[in-house]
Amino acid sequence: MAHYPFSSRPDLLVLTCTHVLSGGDIKLVCHHFDDNSWEFLCGCEHTAEDAIVLTVGELCETDPSLHLLSDLPVGSCAQRQSRSHAWTRGRIEGENFYPAAETRMS
Protein backbone atom coordinates (compact mmCIF):
# COMPACT_ATOMS: atom_id res chain seq x y z
CA MET A 1 0.00 0.00 0.00
CA ALA A 2 1.29 3.44 -0.89
CA HIS A 3 1.32 6.03 1.86
CA TYR A 4 0.53 9.59 0.81
CA PRO A 5 0.48 12.81 2.76
CA PHE A 6 -3.12 13.89 2.88
CA SER A 7 -2.29 17.23 1.30
CA SER A 8 -1.89 15.41 -2.03
CA ARG A 9 -5.27 13.66 -1.63
CA PRO A 10 -7.94 16.24 -0.71
CA ASP A 11 -10.66 13.64 -1.36
CA LEU A 12 -9.29 11.29 1.33
CA LEU A 13 -12.04 10.39 3.81
CA VAL A 14 -11.23 11.02 7.48
CA LEU A 15 -13.08 10.56 10.75
CA THR A 16 -13.78 13.53 12.96
CA CYS A 17 -16.36 14.65 15.50
CA THR A 18 -18.94 17.39 15.73
CA HIS A 19 -16.80 19.19 18.33
CA VAL A 20 -13.92 19.65 15.86
CA LEU A 21 -16.31 21.07 13.26
CA SER A 22 -17.84 23.51 15.73
CA GLY A 23 -14.91 25.85 15.11
CA GLY A 24 -14.14 26.39 18.79
CA ASP A 25 -10.65 26.64 20.22
CA ILE A 26 -10.51 23.05 21.44
CA LYS A 27 -7.89 20.45 22.13
CA LEU A 28 -7.26 18.33 19.03
CA VAL A 29 -5.80 14.84 18.68
CA CYS A 30 -4.83 13.43 15.27
CA HIS A 31 -4.00 9.78 14.52
CA HIS A 32 -2.52 8.40 11.28
CA PHE A 33 -3.06 4.66 11.64
CA ASP A 34 -1.03 1.92 9.98
CA ASP A 35 -3.92 1.14 7.60
CA ASN A 36 -3.37 4.72 6.31
CA SER A 37 -6.61 6.00 7.84
CA TRP A 38 -6.80 9.32 9.69
CA GLU A 39 -8.89 10.65 12.56
CA PHE A 40 -9.11 14.13 14.04
CA LEU A 41 -10.87 14.18 17.41
CA CYS A 42 -11.24 16.65 20.25
CA GLY A 43 -10.25 14.33 23.07
CA CYS A 44 -13.71 14.47 24.72
CA GLU A 45 -16.18 11.66 25.28
CA HIS A 46 -18.17 10.80 22.16
CA THR A 47 -21.31 9.02 21.10
CA ALA A 48 -22.02 7.52 17.67
CA GLU A 49 -24.00 10.67 16.85
CA ASP A 50 -20.83 12.77 17.26
CA ALA A 51 -18.93 10.90 14.51
CA ILE A 52 -18.59 12.49 11.08
CA VAL A 53 -16.82 11.21 7.97
CA LEU A 54 -15.77 13.87 5.48
CA THR A 55 -12.87 14.59 3.16
CA VAL A 56 -9.62 15.93 4.54
CA GLY A 57 -9.99 18.84 2.12
CA GLU A 58 -13.30 19.81 3.71
CA LEU A 59 -11.80 19.47 7.20
CA CYS A 60 -8.79 21.63 6.30
CA GLU A 61 -11.16 24.33 5.03
CA THR A 62 -12.54 24.60 8.59
CA ASP A 63 -9.04 24.65 10.13
CA PRO A 64 -6.19 25.42 7.68
CA SER A 65 -3.60 24.71 10.39
CA LEU A 66 -4.32 20.99 9.91
CA HIS A 67 -2.16 21.14 6.78
CA LEU A 68 0.80 21.13 9.20
CA LEU A 69 0.01 17.46 9.83
CA SER A 70 -0.12 16.35 6.20
CA ASP A 71 3.28 14.65 6.53
CA LEU A 72 2.51 12.89 9.84
CA PRO A 73 4.07 9.45 9.43
CA VAL A 74 1.95 6.31 9.42
CA GLY A 75 1.68 4.97 12.98
CA SER A 76 1.99 8.46 14.47
CA CYS A 77 -0.18 10.90 16.35
CA ALA A 78 -0.15 14.60 17.12
CA GLN A 79 -2.00 16.74 19.62
CA ARG A 80 -2.33 20.34 20.68
CA GLN A 81 -4.11 21.99 23.57
CA SER A 82 -5.70 24.72 21.42
CA ARG A 83 -5.24 26.43 18.06
CA SER A 84 -2.70 28.76 19.65
CA HIS A 85 -0.51 25.86 20.85
CA ALA A 86 2.10 23.98 18.83
CA TRP A 87 1.58 20.38 17.75
CA THR A 88 3.33 17.66 19.76
CA ARG A 89 4.05 14.52 17.71
CA GLY A 90 4.57 10.96 18.83
CA ARG A 91 4.04 7.32 17.91
CA ILE A 92 0.83 5.35 18.39
CA GLU A 93 1.44 2.42 20.72
CA GLY A 94 0.64 -0.89 19.04
CA GLU A 95 0.59 0.53 15.50
CA ASN A 96 3.17 -0.25 12.83
CA PHE A 97 5.39 2.75 12.18
CA TYR A 98 6.34 3.69 8.63
CA PRO A 99 10.14 3.91 8.98
CA ALA A 100 10.78 6.04 5.88
CA ALA A 101 9.21 8.97 7.71
CA GLU A 102 10.98 8.43 11.05
CA THR A 103 13.46 11.27 10.47
CA ARG A 104 10.55 13.72 10.32
CA MET A 105 9.51 12.87 13.89
CA SER A 106 12.07 15.13 15.53
Image (cartoon, grey):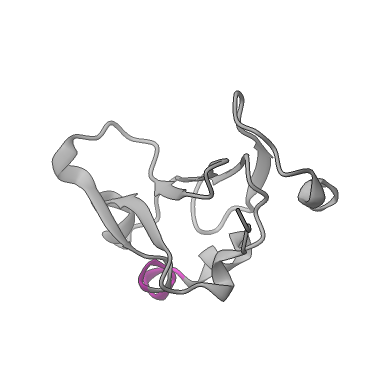
User: Picture quarter containing residue 23?
Assistant: bottom left
Describe residue 106's horizontal placement relative to residue 7 as left or right: right
Q: Is residue 54 above or below residue 99?
A: below
Describe residue 64's horizontal placement relative to residue 94 as left or right: left
Q: Residue at x 63, y 41 (%)?
A: 76
Q: Residue at x 33, y 35 (%)?
A: 44
Closer to us: 29 or 9: 9
| Extreme-left residue of the structure | 49
Range of residues picked out in magenta: 58-63
Q: Residue at x 57, y 74 (%)?
A: 8
Q: Position of residue 105 (x, y in %)?
A: 78, 47
Q: Is residue 27 above or below residue 60?
A: above
| Extreme-top residue of the structure | 94
**Magenta span contains residue 60:** yes
Q: Position of residue 103 (x, y in %)?
A: 85, 49
Question: How many marks on residues?
Answer: 0
| Extreme-right residue of the structure | 103
Closer to us: 105 or 64: 105
The dominant secondary structure in magenta is helix
Describe residue 98's horizontal placement relative to residue 24 as left or right: right
Closer to us: 100 or 17: 100
Q: Is residue 78 above or below residue 95?
A: below
User: Picture quarter containing residue 34?
Assistant: top right
| Extreme-front residue of the structure | 1
Q: Position of residue 90 (x, y in %)?
A: 68, 38
Q: Residue at x 77, y 51 (%)?
A: 101
**Magenta span contains residue 25:** no
